[in-house]
Amino acid sequence: MFNFIFARVRLIVVIVATLLTVAACGSGGGGVLSLAGVGSGGTGIAVLTGFGSLIVDGMRRNDSAARYASEADQGPTIAIAPTGAMLGHSVEYAYDDSGNMTSVLISPELAGTVTAVGPTSITLLGTTVDINIDATIGPATTFAGYASLADIKVGDRIEVHGLLKTDSLGTVHLQATLIVNKLPATGVRLTGYVAQYDAAAGTFALGSNVVTLGSATVSPAGSALSNGQLVTVWSNADPSGSVVTANTVRVKWPTGTSQNVTMSGAISSYASAASFRIRNMNVDASAAVVGPGAASLGDGKYVVVAGSFDAKSNRLTATNVTVFTPAAPTTVELHGTVANFVSAASFTVRGVVVDAGAATFTGGTASQLANGVFVEVHGAVANNLVRAATVTVQALSPLQAPAGSVLDVGGVIDTYDAATGRYTMSMASGAAIGGTLGPSMFYSNGTAINFVPGQSVNVSGMFNGGMLSTSVVNFSQATVAPGSGNTRMEGVVYNVKTNSFMLNGVTIQNNGVTIPGGGMMGGHGMMSGSRVSVDVQLSNGQYLATAIRLLNG
């Protein structure tokens, strides 16, 4: 989602090579599922349900050494910062023999223009996209750049992540896990199962669309297209009617490699525990441990399966199956530092907007929440934010955060040694934190040459031994002075009107503020879906903007 400048361009080549040879499939799940193949590694397709390092379908995995990439807005895969991951993202990943993630690919199912909006669904590229509010049938739909489904309009350009489901008539639709409001652009992405493949004509069907191959690049290298494959297609041009001219086609599944696999999705074609399908993979769970408790299998149930995959038969012999039920629905789990704090009802953790106004607190109180406080949050998606059920205050300062935690902290650089990469930074509290810049850095709203003493930054990395091993630097304007009455907020705006907009659940009056390089509201300035930094001041019960800056992404 974000445009990052990174120090070592050769990282792209490494990530693309790794991800395109890993036809990823699977996920951990539910907190009760054992990892398949720990001891030899494996691959997975999953939905991102939290951070702390990375939590996919309820299972927490260490991603400290993982390389992140995305194919959200273009055909070829590009390297991105770990902070580019969002709640609800569809991810494909590989993990090592200890279960630690080594690569993460963010891959939306659809990107294009909305052609219809209904009370519980929308349509784009001929595909029905269902909005989900039932956490027992999969992660609930979250929104970025919208308050809710009611704000989506015909003609909007959006990006959709979700679960492909096949109904009793064989029609494929998408149950959304994330819908992102995108700025105007050309090009489309669609994902589905290959049908009516005609090698001579160079065409196949994806749902109601006809894809023409022409000179398109098909990956992984050497892949031969065939009916039934799960593929994702990117076209640099908008469709002509229902005809999509492909520039890239990537085969997501099946892979040609027998390996350990986990996969989340809805069960279809259920005959017995020994015979059902997840996405387009055959599963035999006759000898698997099925949980929790007395959970049962059946069509439409959202599960995570783990086991050994045989490429020749496209069959997974499952060792574990986790079923999401009313007693054990999909939930959100966040571990990190509080940022963008306005009140207990509006702050962010790892970029996710949290409303903890009605939460139960342990280890501290709601009155102790502030930027930099390290918390653990459990809750549920409510449109474009997480409604916290519980908040555990684990440290009142980033310096007391648990070892191995991922921190997001802001401040001003005091010292920096370019030879060693070591730096010190004064946080808003006045306390200093030390860190090192990693070998493959990502920079936003600036470059490496801007990392100098006196510069205001927000940094992200893993905290160990009192030092922050930094992977991401986001350059910012001068920090808000203590006692000024101003609060700084960053995020994706929505409900942009002539005189107001919303950010992180808060309505902000634009107060006549001019946006540098963007004029006032709308047009080519700030629009719903824009990423911004805003300084606000509370006056007579209203939040008034005192400065607005458009950010990359």
Image: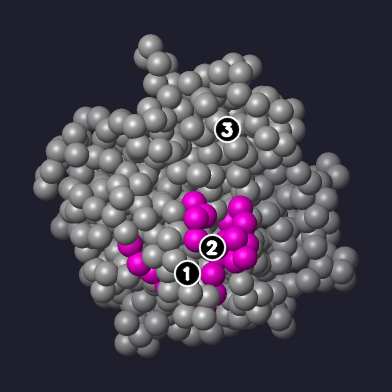
Residue at image coords 77%, 50%: 187
Q: Residue beneath label 2, please?
A: 452
The magenta stretch is: 433-457
Q: Is residue 128 visible?
A: no
**Badge 1: how crowded within 10 Å, few (<14), some, or many (20+)?**
some
Outermost residue, top direction? 540
Residue at image coords 78%, 71%: 217
Q: Residue beneath label 3, please?
A: 548
89 up-or-down from 179: above or below: below
For numbered disc 2, what is the local secondary structure?
loop
In the picture provided, is 197 more to the left or to the right than 472? right
The x and y percentages for residue 170 are: 57, 50
Work out how far the residue at label 1 is from the one at label 2, CA to CA, in angstroms.
7 Å
342 up-or-down from 461: above or below: above
In the picture provided, is 249 more to the left or to the right than 414? right
Work out how far the residue at label 1 is from the one at label 3, CA to CA, in angstroms.
29 Å
Say which label, 1 or 3, has the lower sequence index: 1
For numbered disc 3, what is the local secondary structure?
strand
